[in-house]
């Protein structure tokens, strides 16, 4: 249980809703940090449910402003390249308001890891549409169902010459941990997309219980072991080298 | 040895002497040549040309927390974009120096004629209550000197410090002997990221844990933070007072404007704040000697309003708008005040 050395015991229980995938993502991240003995890790986040996670790690961490976790992390890494700098934030933060930074950090191939929890909505503010809300997804701002294409994050990351993109879900924990392990050991920019829809402010509107969400994730996703562009229903790692 | 330098070049020289270790910026006239100056000094300073103004200042925040002395440079439009991050630097807290070479606004305005339109924004452009130190030199030599002081004040107060310039001051060339300028340096005691287990957050927090519903915690935190910055500001009590014993009027001017009106010292007393904010306390005593106080500035009376509140009396305003400044125009405006 030595992964607990990465958890701030005085903040327990974690402030996320029951059933949220962030609990399992957080613990998996701590386990991998422990297995790799990454005590030189700095967690950087922006604003949102996922971003609150920065305060739960027993590490030096920075919880900045909305959308700006990536440039802040780049600044940390620039001054101290020996640190393992990890952004832990949501898709609204990373691909919405902070979208420009994502384009450019991937282009520059800055040596940081982004763990982006994609829950398809702005969860902390009550469940408005996010850049990745699926077509038909019901949100506070699309009560009849979203009609716009969700953002293709994999496409953005892998359009660069050198890239590392992984997609995982806490439902398949061992696969998630394998993705995180490779991510922390990669030299360059890493994007790990975590798929797990928000339970409280999204799935319930879609008349889905926690059990339905878990069953759907298990049924939908297959793990791809080939190094290639992932299909929408696949988890895996696509990297340029 | 004497050197011919522009205001912006002197800012670069000052930053290097002060121990700048990280600089990030986005191109914008009339501030870009500060960035171009840093580019040539990359053996001393880690430099990143950021993808946008907000990225530049947030990279500075990260670098600052990681232990570096940091600075970014911009002009009005970029300064507007950086405002949210100024509040973050105040809250975290962490040292940060932002140079704002002012140009005519609002919006894209009259690029890139000089202006003094960002005086109020430099004090309270970010949301919520905060205080910060604002310095405004008026010569190439002072650009050097007060860049060092801005970095010192940021380190000492662990807070954002704004170094104002203007399009004219940024690009005037003067000969200066940098070696003859005396200065001391301040260094941070706080350990850089990676050496402890702290949580730096923009949320109100106590003992690293969010305290977002406790007004008492907020009040204690805010007044302590404010006091810390005001205490540090007292050590940076920079101003110039040119007293004319025969004058019953005090002119107040700063930056390039104070250079233009200097010949008026034959007729008036002149007060020039270098630390624009917090407003210089001594001005209260100085002001008592004069029946009239007139602020001359390249904006629509921004510092005049500040001084009216500070001195609790009516203050006259002479404005020079639209990027043009003329001693003759100023003299005409002054004579109108006297014929009223």
Image (spheres, coloured by chain):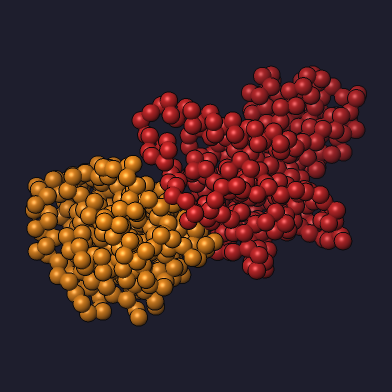
Chain colours: A orange, B red
On the picture, is B148 further left or further right than B175? left
In the rendered image, which quarter is residue A238 located in? bottom left
- Where is residue A80 shown, x and y percent of the image? 52, 62
Using the rendered view, name the quadrant where residue A149 is placed.
bottom left
Q: Is residue B121 above or below residue B338?
A: below
| Pick the front one: A23 or B261 | A23
From the viewer's perspective, is residue B196 above or below residue B327?
Answer: below
In the depicted view, which residue is nearer to us: B186 or A98? B186
Question: Which of A178/A46 is in front?
Answer: A178
Q: Quadrant of the N terminus of chain B?
A: bottom right
User: Can the viewer see residue B49?
Assistant: no
Query: For this view, does A92 lie left or right of residue B169?
Result: left
Residue at the image position 12 percent from the left and 50 percent from the top: A210
Residue A141, percent across and down?
23, 45
Q: Residue at x 33, y 61 (%)?
A: A34
Question: Looking at the picture, how far across and down is residue B162, in whole percent?
Answer: 62, 44
Which residue shows up at 45% across the image and 58% down it?
Answer: A73
Q: Quadrant of the C terminus of chain B?
A: top right
- Residue B159 lies in what quarter of the image? top right
Q: Residue at 35% of width from left, 51% of height from top?
A: A57
Question: So how many labels did they put on this image?
Answer: 0
The answer to whether residue B257 shows anywhere in this view is: yes
| Horizontal and vertical percent position of residue B130 | 53, 34
């Amino acid at each position: 249980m030595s992964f607990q050395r990465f958890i701030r015991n005085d903040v327990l229980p974690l402030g996320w809703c029951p059933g949220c995938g962030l609990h399992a993502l957080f613990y998996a991240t701590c386990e991998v940090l422990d297995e790799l003995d990454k005590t030189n890790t700095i967690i950087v986040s922006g604003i949102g449910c996922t971003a609150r996670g920065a305060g739960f790690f027993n590490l030096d961490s920075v919880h900045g402003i909305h959308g700006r976790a990536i440039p802040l992390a780049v600044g940390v890494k620039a001054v101290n390249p020996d640190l393992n700098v990890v952004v832990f934030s949501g898709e609204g933060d990373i691909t919405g308001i902070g979208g420009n930074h994502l384009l450019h950090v991937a282009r520059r191939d800055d040596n940081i890891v982004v763990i982006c929890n994609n829950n398809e909505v702005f969860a902390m503010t009550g469940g408005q549409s996010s850049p990745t809300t699926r077509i038909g997804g019901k949100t506070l701002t699309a009560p009849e169902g979203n009609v716009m294409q969700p953002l293709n994050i994999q496409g953005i990351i892998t359009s660069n010459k050198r890239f590392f993109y992984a997609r995982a879900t806490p439902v398949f924990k061992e696969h998630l941990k394998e993705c995180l392990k490779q991510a922390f050991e990669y030299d360059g920019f890493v994007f790990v997309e975590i798929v797990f829809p928000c339970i409280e402010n999204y799935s319930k509107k879609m008349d889905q219980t926690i059990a339905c969400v878990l069953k759907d994730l298990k049924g939908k996703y297959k793990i791809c072991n080939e190094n290639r562009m992932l299909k929408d229903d696949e988890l895996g790692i696509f990297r340029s080298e | 040895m004497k050197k011919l330098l522009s205001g912006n070049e002197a800012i670069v020289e000052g930053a290097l002497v002060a121990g700048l270790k990280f600089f990030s910026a986005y191109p914008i006239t009339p501030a870009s040549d500060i960035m171009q100056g840093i580019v040539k000094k990359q053996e001393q300073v880690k430099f990143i040309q950021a993808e946008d103004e907000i990225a530049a200042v947030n990279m500075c925040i990260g670098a600052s927390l990681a232990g570096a002395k940091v600075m970014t440079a911009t002009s009005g439009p970029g300064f507007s974009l950086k405002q949210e991050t100024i509040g973050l630097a105040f809250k975290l807290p962490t040292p940060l120096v932002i140079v704002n070479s002012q140009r005519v606004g609002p919006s894209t305005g009259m690029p890139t004629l000089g202006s003094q339109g960002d005086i109020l924004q430099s004090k309270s452009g970010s949301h919520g209550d905060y205080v910060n130190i604002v310095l405004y030199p008026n010569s190439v030599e002072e650009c050097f000197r007060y860049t060092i002081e801005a970095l010192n004040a940021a380190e000492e107060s662990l807070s954002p410090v704004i170094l104002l310039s203007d399009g004219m001051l940024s690009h005037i060339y003067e000969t200066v002997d940098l070696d003859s300028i005396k200065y001391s340096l301040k260094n941070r005691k706080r350990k850089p990221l990676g050496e402890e287990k702290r949580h730096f957050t923009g949320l109100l927090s106590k003992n690293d844990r969010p305290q977002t519903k406790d007004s008492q915690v907020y009040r204690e935190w805010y007044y302590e933070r404010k006091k810390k910055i005001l205490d540090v500001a007292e050590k940076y009590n920079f101003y110039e007072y040119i007293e004319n014993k025969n004058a019953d009027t005090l002119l107040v001017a700063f930056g390039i404007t104070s250079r233009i009106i200097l010949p008026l010292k034959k007729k008036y007393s002149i007060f020039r704040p270098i630390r624009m904010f917090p407003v210089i306390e001594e001005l209260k005593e100085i002001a008592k000697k004069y029946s009239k106080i007139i602020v001359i500035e390249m904006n629509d009376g921004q510092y005049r309003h500040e001084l009216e509140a500070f001195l609790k009396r009516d203050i006259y305003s002479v404005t020079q708008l639209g990027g043009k400044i003329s001693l003759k125009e100023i003299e005409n405006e002054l004579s109108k005040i006297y014929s009223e």
